[in-house]
Image: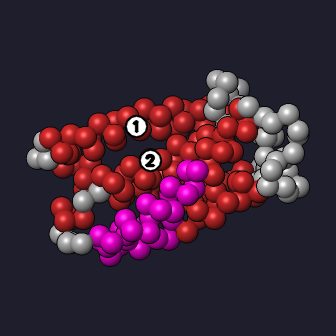
Amino acid sequence: MNTLERLLTAGALLGLALLPVAVIIIWMRKKRPDHWLVLIASRLGLPAAFGVTLISVIGSLYFSQFLLYEPCNVCWWQRVCMFPLILLLGIAWWKQDGGAKKYILPLSSIGAVFAAYNSYIQIWPPSSQHCALGGLVDCSSRYIFTLGFITIPFVSLIAFLLIFLFMVLWRPELNGKNT
């Protein structure tokens, strides 16, 4: 396993660990809204979503522009969902726009669907070696495959889910802005 694969694997495992933590904090918010962990997560949801998006966009561009990994059609649709998020989240963070959830949650959900589909066909490739969406690159071809389940689309899925959960956690009213 090379350094890039180690980094991607570590990021995926960290993201997998954060997913249930975020869900637990969302659940805690209903039971104990004044708990210190809930308050911190509610304030940091938007910056955390921005951070995940920034790392995802830089990683995607690094894979395609420097390592020359050719994205498949499903990867392109994931990019269509991820790339605007960097701008939308950046503006929402700068303006403390409480209405940002209205457009970030659907975009991250759609991206997660594409990433889940791409992860599925990379882990369990179809018998016909062609992606249903066509394209020059087969959607089931893996550039990275570690621990028997971590692929680039799987990391994308984790990123979209984290962005979604961090935005659900975010409460702009705690940052001085009301929705």
Instruction: Report helix, strand or loop for mark 1.
Output: helix
Instruction: Using the rendered image of the protein, determine whether residue 3 is visible from the camera's viewpoint.
Output: no
Does the magenta run of residues contain 86? Answer: yes
Magenta stretch: dominant secondary structure:
helix
As helix, strand or loop, the secondary structure at mark 2 comes to helix
Gap between marks 1 and 2, in whole Å?
8 Å
Q: Is residue 90 positioned above or below 113 on the image?
A: below
Dots 1 and 2: beta carbons under 8 Å? yes
Q: What residue type is labelled 1?
A: Leu
> 41 and 125: which one is in front?
125
Lower position in the chain sequence, tag 1 or tag 2: 1
Q: Quadrant of residue 101?
A: bottom left
Q: Residue at x 22, y 48 (%)?
A: 40
176 sits left or right of 49 in the view: left
- The image shows residue 32 at horizontal and vertical percentages of 13, 42
Amino acid beneath label 2: Leu
Q: Nearer the viewer, residue 125 or 43?
A: 125
List x then y, in percent, for residue 44. 30, 54
In the picture of the structure, the residue carrying the numbered disc 1 is: 18
Q: Which mark is residue 159?
A: none
Is residue 55 placed above or below 21 in the rendered structure? below
Towards the viewer: 82 or 115: 115
Can you identify the residue that label 2 sits on?
A: 162
Q: Indicate the position of residue 167 as horizontal and vertical percent values.
A: 36, 56
Relative to 83, 134 lies left or right: right
Residue 60 appears in which quarter of the rendering? bottom right
Q: In this view, does 116 lie above or below 110?
A: above
